[in-house]
């Protein structure tokens, strides 16, 4: 049950002023907390974000982190992009303060049933599909987390009969305390974020926190085709439901089917959702076709496995644009899928040298670019009719953009500008 008075008169410091930080600060203020926000950046985006705070009573610090804001706090909320070894988090430990995530704040105040989805790949698609399945079953549903609005933005609208379908990352799960979804889903596990975790086991341990507070009245949905996740079931107190790839369905759809069965949704309603689903923004999204060359926005692909999936699902020759902030993964795993399909790769961002070294054994040429615009422009110039220019970065966006969505929008704008120029030339 929600605890509406939990934050009343508590001094809360929020580290990070991204979308979730703003939403969390506003919700906490409305719940009676005394709120401070500290953001290491002082740039136009940070100042824009601070302008979205609902009250001047929310104290905002830009361009630094002050020890005093941590020392005076009753509890601290951390944004998912802030590393746990950062100086301000060390202060949290030094002063023995409670450190929680934005999804923990929202869940304390949430009266609705929570369905939480995590995994290395497919989270956004599965979260979206479960939301559509619940809508088809005439349920009031709020899809949020890493897609849509932050969880904290939606809490005040929720009722006990509603559902929250929540995409959660391992970063968010690191700092949960009592977060307890009615249904927890772990889709898969492949090497990812190894710049943050020492090994795959640490990454798995972070994912497993999604079900650590569940009890026998809750459900844990796991990929039965993944040995690591199958083994993880032994530590669950909740009822475990395994999904495996079913005939005619991809693994994402099989996971959605498992959740639909738990919720008692009719099979024909789920199948209708699958038939009508047109995909999600920034995931194999066709932006334009210019002189016979298709441009595909796959900015959501922040892992090598996601890029492999994209390459396998495109039939035409590919000019690949990849790169961003390195997450410790091995890019060589795409070489088998790329063989005979990728004809050229343009690499951008902090990881471009690492990716170039890993892909050096491929049967395609590699060129580095300073910006996304430069990469797209060069790809356009070198593409032939029938080719596909694919943005599938395999990296996070934080070196050049605020998130994958901004990166995807930037790609779209560059491509549409090129399309406009081509049309003007006739």
Image (cartoon, grey):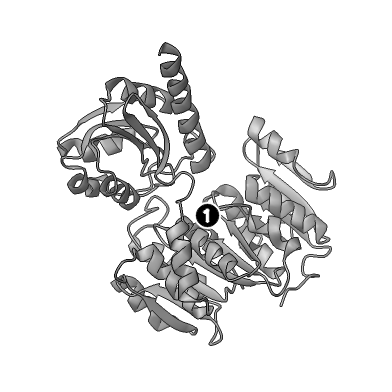
Q: Position of residue 378 (x, y in %)?
A: 33, 22
Q: Position of residue 326 (x, y in %)?
A: 38, 43
Residue found 76% across the figure and 52% down from its top: 26
Q: Residue at x 15, y 38 (%)?
A: 361
Residue linked to disc 1: 84
Image coordinates for residue 94, horizontal then vertical, percent: 62, 59
- Residue lying at 24% horizontally and 47% vertically, measured from the top left: 334
The number of numbered badges drawn on the structure is 1
> 5 and 279: which one is in front?
279
- Against 395, residue 10 (above or below) is below
Q: Is residue 137 visible?
A: yes
Indicate whether 7 appears above or below 311. below
Q: Is residue 263 left or right of residue 302?
A: right
The local secondary structure at tag 1 comes to loop
* Left or right: 386 in relation to 213: left
Q: Quadrant of the C terminus?
A: top left
Q: Residue furthest bottom?
A: 216
């Amino acid at each position: 049950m929600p605890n509406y008075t939990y934050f009343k008169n508590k001094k809360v410091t929020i580290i990070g002023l991204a979308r979730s930080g703003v939403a969390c600060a506003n919700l906490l203020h409305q719940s009676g907390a005394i709120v401070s926000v500290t953001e290491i950046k002082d740039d136009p985006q940070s100042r824009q974000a601070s302008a979205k705070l609902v009250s001047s009573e929310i104290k905002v610090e830009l361009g630094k982190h002050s020890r005093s804001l941590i020392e005076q706090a009753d509890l601290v909320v951390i944004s998912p992009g802030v590393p746990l070894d950062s100086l301000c988090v060390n202060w949290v430990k030094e002063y023995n303060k409670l450190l929680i995530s934005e999804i923990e704040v929202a869940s304390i105040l949430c009266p609705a049933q929570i369905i939480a989805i995590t995994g290395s790949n497919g989270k956004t698609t599965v979260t979206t599909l479960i939301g559509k399945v619940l809508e088809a079953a005439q349920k009031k549903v709020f899809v949020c987390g890493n897609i849509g609005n932050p969880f904290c933005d939606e809490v005040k609208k929720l009722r006990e009969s509603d559902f929250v379908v929540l995409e959660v990352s391992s970063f968010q799960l690191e700092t949960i305390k009592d977060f307890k979804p009615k249904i927890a889903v772990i889709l898969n596990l492949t090497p990812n974020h190894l710049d943050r975790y020492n090994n795959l086991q640490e990454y798995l341990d972070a994912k497993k926190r999604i079900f650590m507070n569940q009890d026998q009245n809750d459900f844990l949905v796991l990929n039965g085709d993944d040995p690591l996740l199958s083994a993880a079931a032994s530590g669950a107190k909740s009822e475990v439901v395994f999904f495996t790839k079913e005939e005619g369905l991809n693994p994402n759809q099989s996971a959605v089917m498992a959740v639909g069965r738990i919720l008692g949704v009719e099979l024909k309603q789920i199948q209708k959702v699958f038939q009508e689903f047109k995909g999600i923004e920034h995931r194999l999204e066709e932006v334009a076709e210019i002189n016979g060359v298709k441009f595909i926005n796959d900015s959501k692909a922040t892992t090598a496995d996601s890029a492999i999936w994209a390459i396998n699902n495109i039939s035409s020759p590919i000019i690949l644009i990849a790169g961003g902030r390195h997450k410790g993964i091995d890019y060589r795993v795409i070489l088998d899928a790329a063989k005979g399909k990728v004809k050229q790769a343009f690499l951008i961002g902090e990881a471009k040298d690492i990716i170039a070294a890993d892909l050096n054994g491929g049967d395609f040429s590699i060129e580095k670019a300073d910006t996304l615009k430069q990469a797209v422009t060069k790809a356009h110039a070198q593409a032939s009719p029938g080719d596909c220019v694919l943005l599938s970065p395999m990296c996070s966006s934080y070196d050049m953009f605020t998130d994958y969505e901004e990166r995807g929008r930037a790609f779209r704008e560059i491509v549409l500008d090129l399309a406009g120029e081509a049309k003007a030339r006739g």
